Amino acid sequence: MLQIVKIEHNKERFRSFVGNLILITIISLFVFILIASLIGMNQNISVLPSQASLSKSQATEDFLSMANLAYFSMRTMFRMIIGMFWSFLFSFVFGVLAVRFKTARRLILPLVNFLESVPLLGFLTFTTTFLLGLFPGSVMGVEALAVFAVFTGQAWNIMLTLYQTMEVVPTDLTEVTTQFKYNAWEKFWRLEFVYSIPGLLWNVVISQTAAWFALVASEQATVAIPKDTTLMLPGIGSYIQIALDRADFISCLFAVIALLINVILLNFLVFQPLIKASYYFRYDTGTNSDNPPKSIIYDLIEPASLGRWFLIKFEILKNFWIYRLPKIWYLFSLDKLFQFLGRMKSFFVTLWYMALLVIGVSGAIKLYYFLPHDDFGIIPKLTLYTTLRVLLAMVVSGVIFTPLAVWVASSKKRLSYVQPIGQILGSIPSSIYTPFIIIFISLGYQQMEWWILPLIMVGCQWYYFFNVIGGYLAIPDEIRDVTKIFPLSRVKWWTKYLIPSILPYIITAIINAAGAAWNADIAAESIQWGKNKIEVTGLGQYISANNGIKDKSALGTLAMCIIVGVCIAFVWQPLYKYARERFHY
């Protein structure tokens, strides 16, 4: 008996040792990435190489070497982590404001829905000068641009998820917080936030597709300082761009592999353990028979004594954050101040809308005089061409990937295998497929211009895939059982049951896919392969041809944003409201 106890004790000590070793390794990896990236960022902007020199360079220390690719992968990973931090911070602030205050909600939700569909170029056109000005003459300013790209790729989705989840917290749980007299701070951190964690993490994983896409695209974006010089930020995106400039297919392949390794590592080391840890925070009535998610890393580090030490310290921090910190609020009578301000609500609402009106009108006037009036006549035609391509790509993507997502989601086994693969493939930017498109064009199909369609589709098709999967899994089990009791023909199964059940998710997919499709189209209308440049007529070609000319780039981007805004306001939002009110359980 003592021998058995001793053996079990030794096994436990060994598991604890392995867990500690893995935990220390993961922490050391991220600390190393942090230090190395900070060293690289705190340099003068003159250390960044120009795109022109890199395209011709054949030096021994070549830009496309494997050592550079490993370093660039680390810098890209750092930007992803920092961008994720700012996305969470934005979501907590504005998500809670939207839930708590009706006036803020009327502004935040429409604005976020619009920003969710604005392509990356729309943000960078109007924010590049500001972000570079925050760190004049430093690489940090260019880093801020790349981090901002990550932010725009996922912040809107995360914030809307937090808002929507907080809005549907079960009434019985809310009543418990009332009975225990929780203040607003305790209610959020002890109920609403905890209730939101599973859905929030799931949405973050899905948002990685757009975040990686935006990050790689932003590293390829040109930053002209001075005006006639294009500087390249070290990263997988810039590596891809130089490989395309040199028509180096092998380097493009290595860049894809490096990107996939980054995506897999982040999911394996961070998201899978977090998702498994958050599984026990879900609100379950006891009828859910799903198996807990799997994570090798979580299982290995769970017995670690170092992990338990971190939990003890976290418990101390949690008690301070939830219970002691709010006492400062009441100590300085800030609650009474806000009660007083609340009685002046109508005054502040009027002041708020007047300020928005003044800012909007003055901004519109300045923008009008800044834009090149001579090009106003050609913009409608270019916008029409690009809009038709985007619309066609979105329709084809929806027709293909909606039934594919239903087929995957209808089997847990298929879902467990196909979904991670989809997340990885969705992270690959459309420019990676350029070599294959060049081969297609070389066969004589350039005049047809159909080659641009798959490049747009890879930017938007995954939104249909993931949102439809989420909608299918959200259908209550009893509704599915009814369809089995009363067999339906295949046509009626789709038209009377499935499409009405997942329609809100399909509309959400369309809204998300619109911005991604515009992103992909703008990049695809002018592609570079070595010395060859292949273009089609449209807004993307117009913006590419006028790269560095701020007023013309702003005009093309503004036309794109107007189309997106009109579609959001007059098409997608009314459809989403109708679907949410008409088709729900």
Image (tube, helix red, strand yellow):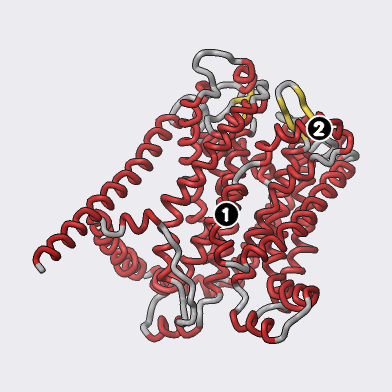
Report if residue 352 is visible in the image.
no
Q: Residue at x 50, y 70 (%)?
A: 341
Q: Farthest residue to the left: give it.
A: 2
Residue at 9% in and 66% down: 2
Who's the residue at 64% across and 69% down the image?
471
Give x and y (percent) for residue 487.
Answer: 73, 82
Q: Position of residue 400 (x, y in %)?
A: 75, 57
Q: Nearer the viewer, residue 522 or 252?
A: 252
Q: Which type of secondary structure does the marked residue at label 2 adopt?
A: helix
Question: Which of pointers 1 and 2 indicates the residue nearer the eye?
Answer: 2
Residue 390 on image: x %, y %:
79, 49
- Quick one: label 1, few (<14), some, or many (20+) residues within 10 Å? many
Q: Quadrant of residue 103?
A: bottom right
- Numbered tag placed on residue 199 in the rendering: none
Quadrant (top left, top right, bottom left, bottom right) of the N terminus:
bottom left
Taking the image as shown, residue 334 lies to the left or right of residue 394, namely left
Q: Quadrant of residue 468?
A: bottom right
Figure quadrant of the C terminus: bottom right
Q: Quadrant of residue 582?
A: bottom right
For image coordinates 73% across by 66% down, the residue present is: 573
**Toward the viewer: 96 or 381?**
381
Q: Which residue is mark 2?
A: 441
Check disc 1 and give the amino acid type. Answer: Ser
Residue 567 is left or right of residue 473, and the answer is right
Tell me which amino acid carries mark 2.
Ile
Q: Looking at the picture, does residue 4 appear above or below residue 584?
A: above
Does the CB distance between marks 1 and 2 fall below 8 Å? no
Q: CA distance from mark 1 to mark 2?
A: 32 Å
Image location (x, y in percent) of residue 160: 58, 63
Nearer to us in this view, 337 or 523: 523
Identify the residue position indicated by label 1 in the image. Answer: 207
